[in-house]
């Protein structure tokens, strides 16, 4: 979690998580990351709504 904190903390949108073939595996939302770092696991691996998981404005982070 701490490795992606800098990327997520500066992002205005959720960050896509992709595998080695650039297939989307999930997203990281800033609030969920901060909650996880604070020890609140309520939102970790929660299923999002269709609108949350298919954001057309998502940007690739390298």
Image (cartoon, rainbow, N blue to C red):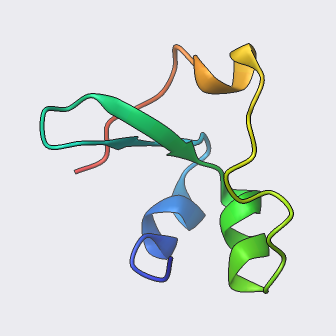
Instruction: Name the side, left or right, on which 1 lies relative to 36.
Output: left
Q: How many marks?
A: 0
Height in image: 33 above or below 1?
above
Height in image: 24 above or below 7?
above
Height in image: 19 above or below 39?
above
Q: Position of residue 19 (x, y in %)?
A: 24, 42
Instruction: Name the side, left or right, on which 59 lies relative to 50.
Output: left
- Front residue (pair 29, 7): 29
Q: Quadrant of residue 37?
A: bottom right
Q: Position of residue 55 (x, y in %)?
A: 58, 19
Q: Position of residue 53 (x, y in %)?
A: 62, 25
Instruction: Name the side, left or right, on which 58 lies relative to 47.
Output: left
- Front residue (pair 20, 13): 20
Q: Quadrant of residue 10?
A: bottom right
> Residue shown at 13%/33% (left/top)?
21
Q: Position of residue 54 (x, y in %)?
A: 58, 17
> Residue shown at 71%/15% (left/top)?
50
Height in image: 25 above or below 42?
above
> Residue shown at 46%/73% (left/top)?
6
> Residue shown at 13%/43% (left/top)?
20
């Amino acid at each position: 979690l701490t490795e992606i904190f800098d990327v997520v903390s500066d992002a205005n949108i959720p960050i896509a998580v992709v595998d080695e073939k650039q297939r989307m595996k999930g997203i990281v939302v800033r609030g969920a990351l901060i909650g996880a770092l604070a020890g609140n696991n309520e939102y970790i691996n929660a299923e999002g709504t269709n609108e949350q998981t298919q954001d057309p404005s998502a940007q690739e982070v390298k």
